[in-house]
Image (cartoon, helix red, strand yellow):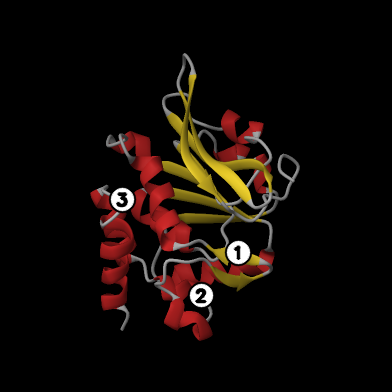
C-alpha cells in the first residue's frame, strides 16, 4: 500500500543526499514507517519531518534515522562489528526496526512504559525477533549485556553519558549521541573507542527531545 511512498522517500530524501550505504538504504526501503505512527498521520508517514507519537515524544524524520544508522555502520563492514547495538530511547520503534535490519541483536531502553509496549507490539507483528526491550533509565545503559559494538541515543544529553561510553566495545565501539545545553540546538557527535584513544566525529547541528535520566537532564 505504501511501497511507492517508501521508495520515493529513499530516493528523494536519502539517496539524493548523502546516504550511500547500501545496507542502510535497503533497510529504509524495507521498514514500513507508517506502522510506527498513529493511523491519522499515515498520510504524512513518509514526509521528511518528525511526527508526534504521544508522551511528548516524536518519531524522527526519516533522513535523520538514515544518517544516524549510516554513521554506526559505515566503515564497519566486518560481521563482528555489527553484532550488538544498544538504543537509548525506543520511542515509536522505527529506528529500532532499522537497527534490527543492520545488527544481529538490538537492545533498546525506553523510560515510557506505554511507548515501549506499543513498539514491542508493532515490531512483533512485523516479525522482528532479534530485539530485546527494557523500561527504565537509558542513561545508565544495560550493563549486564555490555559490551556493545554500537550505542545510539535518540534524545539530547547535556554531555556524553559516561556509563554508555564505558559499555562500548573497546575495539572500535561507536557511541552516537546529540549533545548540547541548548534545548533547541544540539550537535550530533560520534565517539569511537579504541584501546589507545577515543575519536570524536561531528555530524553537525540537530534538534532532539531531551534525554531524561541520571546521566542526562
- Asked whether disc 3 touches disc 1, contact meaning CB atoms under 8 Å apart, the reply is no
Per the image, the residue denoted by label 3 is 19
Q: Position of residue 125 (x, y in %)?
A: 43, 74
Residue found 28% across the figure and 34% down from its top = 78
Q: Earlier in the sequence, mark 2 or mark 1?
A: 2
Residue 128, image x and y in percent?
40, 63
Q: Position of residue 111 (x, y in %)?
A: 68, 57
183 lies above or below 180? below
Helix, strand or loop under label 2: loop
Q: Which residue is mark 2?
A: 37
Choose mark 2 or mark 1, whichever is in front: 2
Horizontal side of residue 202 vs 183, given as left or right:
left
N-terminal label among 2 and 3: 3
Residue 65, numbered label: none
Tag 1 residue = 116
- Mark 2 to mark 1 CA distance (whole Å): 14 Å
Q: Nearer the viewer, residue 71 or 97?
A: 71
Measure the alpha-carbon separation of dots 3 and 1.
28 Å
Q: Are marks 2 and 3 in contact (CB under 8 Å)?
A: no
Count of picture labels: 3
Secondary structure state at the residue bearing disc 3 = loop
Mark 2 Cα-neighbour bin, 10 Å: few <14, some 14–19, many ≥20: many
Q: Nearer the viewer, residue 196 or 16?
A: 16
Q: Kindly tell me whether residue 132 is visible in this rendering.
A: yes
Residue 147, placed above or below residue 34:
above
Single out the mark in the foreground, 3 or 1: 3
Name, please, the residue furthest toward the top: 196
Q: Is residue 104 visible?
A: no
Amino acid at each position: 500500500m505504501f511501497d511507492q511512498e517508501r521508495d520515493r522517500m529513499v530516493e528523494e530524501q536519502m539517496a539524493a543526499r548523502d546516504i550511500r550505504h547500501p545496507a542502510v538504504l535497503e533497510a529504509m526501503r524495507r521498514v514500513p514507517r507508517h506502522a510506527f505512527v498513529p493511523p491519522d498521520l499515515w498520510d504524512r508517514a513518509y514526509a521528511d519531518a518528525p511526527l508526534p507519537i504521544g508522551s511528548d515524544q516524536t518519531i524522527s524524520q526519516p533522513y535523520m534515522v538514515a544518517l544516524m544508522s549510516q554513521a554506526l555502520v559505515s566503515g564497519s563492514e566486518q560481521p563482528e562489528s555489527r553484532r550488538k547495538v544498544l538504543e537509548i530511547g525506543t520511542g515509536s520503534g522505527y529506528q529500532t526496526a532499522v537497527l534490527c535490519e543492520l545488527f544481529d541483536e538490538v537492545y533498546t531502553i525506553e523510560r515510557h512504559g506505554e511507548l515501549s509496549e506499543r513498539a514491542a507490539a508493532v515490531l512483533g507483528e512485523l516479525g522482528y525477533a532479534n530485539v530485546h526491550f527494557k523500561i527504565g533509565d537509558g542513561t545508565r545503559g544495560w550493563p549486564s549485556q555490555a559490551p556493545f559494538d554500537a550505542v545510539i541515543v535518540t534524545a539530547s544529553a547535556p554531555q556524553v553519558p559516561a556509563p554508555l561510553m564505558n559499555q562500548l566495545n573497546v575495539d572500535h565501539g561507536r557511541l552516537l549521541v546529540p549533545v548540547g545545553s541548548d534545548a533547541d540546538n544540539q550537535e550530533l557527535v560520534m565517539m569511537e573507542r579504541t584501546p589507545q584513544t577515543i575519536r570524536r566525529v561531528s555530524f553537525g547541528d540537530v534538534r532532539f527531545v531531551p534525554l531524561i535520566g541520571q546521566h542526562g537532564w
